[in-house]
Image: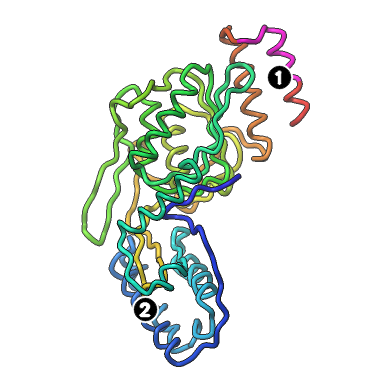
Amino acid sequence: MKKVFNLFLIYVVISFNSKTNAQDVTERNKQILEIADKIKEYYIFEDIANQLSKTLKSEINLKTFDSLPDVEFAKSLSTYLTKNGNDLHFNVLYRPRQEKEKKVVTEKEILKEYDAINKQWNYGFEKVIRLNGNIGYIEYTGFPEGNQAAQQILDATMSFVSNTNTLIIDLRNNQGGDGKMVELFLSYFFDKKIKLNEVYSRYNDKTTKSYTAKKVNGKKYLDKPVYILVNNKTISAAEAFAYNLQQNKIATIIGEKTYGAANPVKAFLIGNKYQVFIPVSLEKNAITNSNWEHIGIDADIKINSEKALIKAQILALENLLKSNTKTELTENEIKENILKLKRQL
């Protein structure tokens, strides 16, 4: 499945081979120091932030990263931070276009650039179709920034599936994105405004609360079965979406345990060449008062993720029979479809 591009994901990687000289090493050391200082100031857990910052600075004397080309440095540092910080949300990306232009790129410019790319991927909505039995299916590959353009595509998608009897949302390989888009999407499944979570940030000592919207631009999808497909590459915002619907008893999760990255990140531009993503907040669900960091989300129905869609269709069709829901299929046709699908498991 294709992936939408957003602040969490890299959308281009270009490697340049060049000799490492003294000037390069000096620049690299400055970048490491800047990253270490950002971690100390912003990382959510103060004790880990102080230790990780100190450890990273010590790598300068050890010349750990001196000989690495830019792309390899970004990859190596990402691995280093996730391992030593014990947090899967650390990430370092090399941005060659930004480096080539030799100018500081603002956050607003970055968002504009990402939005242009997201538009090419239809803001993550890869496939929206109606399956046999009047079952809606949405293949969603990422959560882009929840701006007006993305919301319009979301509204159109939910309008398309509004008359279906059951909805399957495929989040397999969805690597997350923007929390605002999570709120917008979730709002379609609640009949009233509800609190989703609280997010605390140490660097500014602030707690923010997240809610669904009372109203949406389309018709809400209420009181009908919802199935969400997940795997070990369902990450971050995608996990938040699934977790909230699971904990509110709105959706059934099918597939494999998710990745386990819960704490929100903030992106920093480093040395006009890299973007560093640092977990800056601690998210707590309104129902569980916890999250899925490190542990992932367990599926309600565990099955090889490659067969998750088949399983969801079987469950949806069986539910149609039990509830005597009218569809374009006769009762015998529904039973025949179930048998065909079961042979594929």
Specify whether residue 228 is in view: no
Which residue is drawn at the image coordinates 49% and 28% (left, top)?
251
Amino acid type of the residue tagged 1 in the rendering = Ile
| Extreme residue toward the bottom, this view | 22
Q: Position of residue 56 (x, y in %)?
A: 41, 78
Q: Position of residue 204 (x, y in %)?
A: 21, 59
Q: Spatial distance from mark 1 to mark 2, Cα to Cα?
A: 59 Å
Q: Is 33 placed left or right of 140 in the picture?
A: left
246 and 166: which is toward the camera: 166
> From the image, which quarter does the N terminus lie in?
top right
Provide the secondary structure element on which disc 2 rests.
helix
Looking at the rendered structure, which numbered label has been put on residue 54?
A: 2
Predominant SS of the magenta segment: helix
Q: Is residue 76 above or below residue 295?
A: below
Q: Position of residue 69 (x, y in %)?
A: 53, 79
**Picture quarter containing residue 170?**
top right
Q: Is residue 285 above or below residue 41?
A: above
In the rendered structure, which segment of residues is drawn in magenta?
A: 328-339
Amino acid type of the residue tagged 2 in the rendering = Lys
Looking at the rendered structure, which numbered label has been put on residue 252?
A: none
Q: Residues within 10 Å of mark 2 (few under 14, many from 20)?
A: some
Which residue is drawn at the image coordinates 37% and 46% (left, top)?
145
Q: Position of residue 137 (x, y in %)?
A: 56, 28
Pointer 1 residue:
338
Provide the secondary structure element on which disc 1 rests.
helix
**Picture quarter containing residue 30?**
bottom left
**Magenta region includes residue 223:** no
